[in-house]
Amino acid sequence: MSEYAVIYEQGPTSWGAYCPDLPGLGVVGDTHAEVERLIREGLEIHIESLREHSEPVPEPTSTVGVIAITAA
């Protein structure tokens, strides 16, 4: 099992998500929950397609960190 980093972004009217290690994979939805479901499905479909076409599946290399700052 591999674990891929996923970036979630909230826009003015929607949510989006993408996976830095799988270029071209991105989703948009109305809610965070919808986008989380869509990106999970997208990851599975994307990797399955790469394997079906005998293309290499990129190893996960991205990590995610959170840095807290105090506003001045």
Image (cartoon, rainbow, N blue to C red):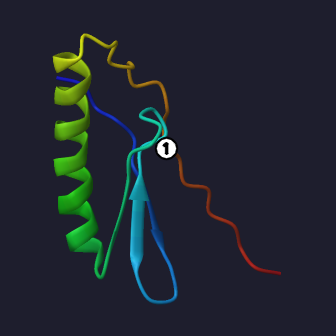
Q: Nearer the viewer, residue 5 or 24?
A: 24
Looking at the figure, which quarter contains the N terminus?
top left
> Residue placed farthest to the bottom in the image?
13
- Mark 1 lies on residue: 64
Q: Nearer the viewer, residue 63 or 38?
A: 38
**Left or right of 9 in this view: 55:** left
In the displayed structure, would residue 48 be above or below residue 66? above
Residue at 51% of width from left, 80% of height from top? 11
Residue 28: where, in percent of width, then height?
A: 36, 69
Q: Amino acid at mark 1?
A: Val
Secondary structure beneath dot 1 equals loop
Residue 68: where, in percent of width, then height?
A: 62, 63
Looking at the figure, which quarter contains the C terminus?
bottom right
Residue at 39% of width from left, 74% of height from top? 15
In the displayed structure, would residue 33 be above or below residue 6? below
Residue at 22% of width from left, 59% of height from top? 38
Residue 53: where, in percent of width, then height?
A: 23, 17
